[in-house]
Amino acid sequence: MNPLAEPVMPKHASAEQLASRVREFVDSRVLPCEVQLNKGGNEAREQLKVLSRAAREGGLRGMFYPAECGGRVASLEEYLPVAEEEGRTEFSQTLFASHSALDAHMLLRFASGPAKQQFLEPLIRGEAIPSYGMTEPDHCGSLPAHISTRARLDNGEWVIQGKKWFICNTGSSHFVTVLVRTDSEAAPGEALSMILVPTDSPGFEVNRSIAVMGRQQGQGEMHFNAVRVPEHNILGAPGEGVMLMRSRLGMGRVLRAAHWVGLARRSYELMLDRLLSDRCQRAGLARKQLVRKHVYDVHEAIISARHLLREAARLVDLNAECDVEVNMAKVAASHALCLAADSAVQIYGAEGVSDESPLSGIYRTARTTRILDGSDEALISSVGRQLIERYAQQ
């Protein structure tokens, strides 16, 4: 069943066809393996490699890479239905290189020639895994004014000193784009830069992995102990770190949120499948008003998030001012996933919070979305301020 399939067709048939192929791949190849994949360990890693290779051979990896890098979808707006289908599994990032697309776009736009050769080309070939180092321990989130990891130029090399934590792909990445302070005297908006660091550099250390709600999901802490990299490893120019961070966050939040909507749809489908099962039919759950309210609320949240995402993606494609639209879409997608996962768990009962169903893992993922890429409180406060300012200027 697909009760919330995307009703509006993308502009080009190829995007529609890709979305359909991704759904078939997820349903037939990935979902039957999820119990094994969720256990982690060597067997799960080997299974992911097999599935990733199959996705690549089927032309389903890196679909939102830039066109110059082999991407198959022309715009972020067109990619949304494809991303939803990818997002129906928690393993979309590994299987479809979905989040690597963000690094590919950033590298193509802002990396130097030598850096593109060293980092972008292996990324596109599927030989390199990226990570992004922004958040630091001992500070309030990732506020630019609080970034203390530093980099200084010394004989044509950046020397980097500092720590980052809660970084995705910590133990598996081949390079990290790290946000650093390169000018201690400049104003906050001009003091930071982004520098590319190979993870095999002397002085780079993965200090520890960090479990998320009792589950290892690739998060960890990185230390940079006088790590030296060439001057040309900088993205853009020195002092452009805040600008690059905002550029990255706009596309990144939409990409993540689109996958969250897909995972919300998966939870919704699981809930409806359970309600229509013989065991629930015998209990008459589908006839209960409060159960129907779960269905209504989740459906409404998913549809609302989907439409907000479409508007945000359209503005990102136009390179227009879109902070309000992107942040609203991110919060809405997070809300939809949290609500869908929680409602599905409630319908499943005890089975929903156990490893007998995929919902326990989805529930953990859902809760993190209210923090990832900006907490609800920070984004809602920012959007509220901007809306007041907009009205005041009318």
Image (spheres, rainbow, N blue to C red):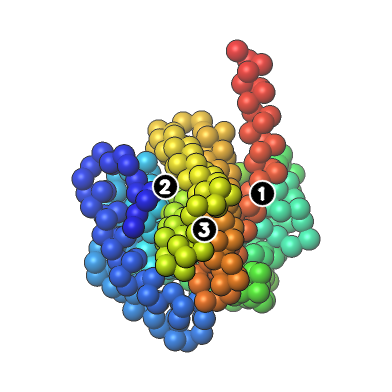
> From the viewer's perspective, is residue 211 above or below residue 307?
below
Mark with earlier residue (2, 1): 2
Q: Is residue 343 above or below residue 89?
A: above
Image check: 219 left or right of 266?
A: right
Query: From what the image shows, is residue 122 above or below residue 82?
Result: below
The residue mark sitting in front, 3 or 1, is 3
Q: Residue shown at 47%/87% (left/top)?
A: 42
Q: Nearer the viewer, mark 2 or mark 1?
A: 1
Q: Which mark is residue 109?
A: 2
Q: Secondary structure at mark 2?
A: helix
Looking at the image, tell me whether mark 3 or mark 1 is earlier in sequence order.
Answer: 3
Question: In the rendered image, which quarter is residue 44 located in?
Answer: bottom left
The local crowd at label 2, few if under 14, some if 14 to 19, many if 20 or more residues have their Cα within 10 Å, is few
For the residues labelled 3 and 1, say whether their Cβ atoms are less than 8 Å apart.
no
Amino acid at circle 1: Ser
Q: Nearer the viewer, residue 394 or 208?
A: 394
Residue type at mark 3 is Leu
Query: Residue at (44%, 86%) from the top-left corner?
Result: 43
Q: Residue furthest top?
A: 394
Which numbered disc, 3 or 2, marks the residue closer to the eye?
Answer: 3
Q: Secondary structure at mark 1?
A: loop
For the residues labelled 2 and 1, the Cα–Cα distance comes to: 28 Å
Seen at 30% across and 66% down, the residue is: 25
Q: Which residue is mark 3?
A: 285
- Quadrant, the N terminus: bottom left
List x then y, in percent, for residue 303. Answer: 45, 41
Residue that label 1 marks: 375
Q: Is residue 392 left or right of residue 288?
A: right
Q: Residue furthest right?
A: 138
x and y, in percent, of residue 357 in the image: 50, 72
